[in-house]
Image (tube, rainbow, N blue to C red):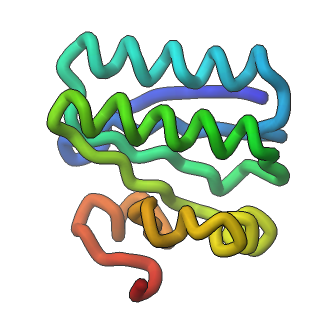
């Protein structure tokens, strides 16, 4: 899995590419989020448009990112979720917990992908 970061309209954007399945990848993601929080980030967008698969550990990392940001007074917005990942979020009811948007532009404007 590849991970990249950039700033867009005051948001820190973390883009994940590949499969979000293995522990080392999840640890890398958590470290990046932790570093962003330490550096003062309060608004995070996690771009999952290039993620093909996610397992329970990947979901755990997504929850961990949310908890880290909330504890620092921030928020996380998830974008680009494909049908398979979206179905997993629905089954686990995380679609009720996460802020999900179709893309980065919508997330920076605050328009939700669907109503809960």
Depicted 94 relative to depicted 40: above or below: below
* Residue depicted at x 58% and y 69%: 93
Front residue (pair 70, 17): 70
Quadrant of the image for the N terminus? top right
* Residue depicted at x 73% and y 22%: 25
Q: How many marks?
A: 0
Q: Residue furthest front?
A: 92
Q: Does 68 sit left or right of 82 as displayed? A: left
**Picture coordinates of residue 22 (x, y %)?**
84, 26
* Residue depicted at x 80% and y 68%: 84
Front residue (pair 8, 40): 40
**Picture coordinates of residue 116 (x, y %)?**
42, 84
* Residue depicted at x 51% and y 59%: 79
Depicted 47 relative to depicted 12: above or below: below
**Picture coordinates of residue 30 (x, y %)?**
54, 21
Q: Does 28 sit left or right of 5 as displayed? A: right
Q: Residue furthest bottom?
A: 115
Give residue 109's quadrant in the image.
bottom left
Q: Does 36 sit left or right of 64 as displayed? A: left
């Amino acid at each position: 899995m590849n991970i990249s970061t950039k700033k867009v309209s005051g948001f820190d954007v973390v883009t994940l590419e590949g499969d979000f399945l293995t522990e080392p990848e999840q640890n890398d993601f958590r470290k990046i989020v932790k570093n962003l929080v330490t550096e003062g980030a309060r608004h995070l967008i996690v771009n999952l448009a290039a993620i093909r698969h996610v397992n329970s550990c990947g979901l755990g990392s997504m929850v961990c990112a949310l908890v880290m940001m909330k504890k620092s007074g921030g928020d996380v917005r998830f974008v680009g979720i494909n049908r398979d990942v979206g179905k997993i979020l629905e089954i686990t009811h995380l679609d009720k917990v996460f802020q999900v948007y179709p893309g980065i532009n919508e997330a920076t404007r605050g328009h939700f992908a669907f109503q809960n």
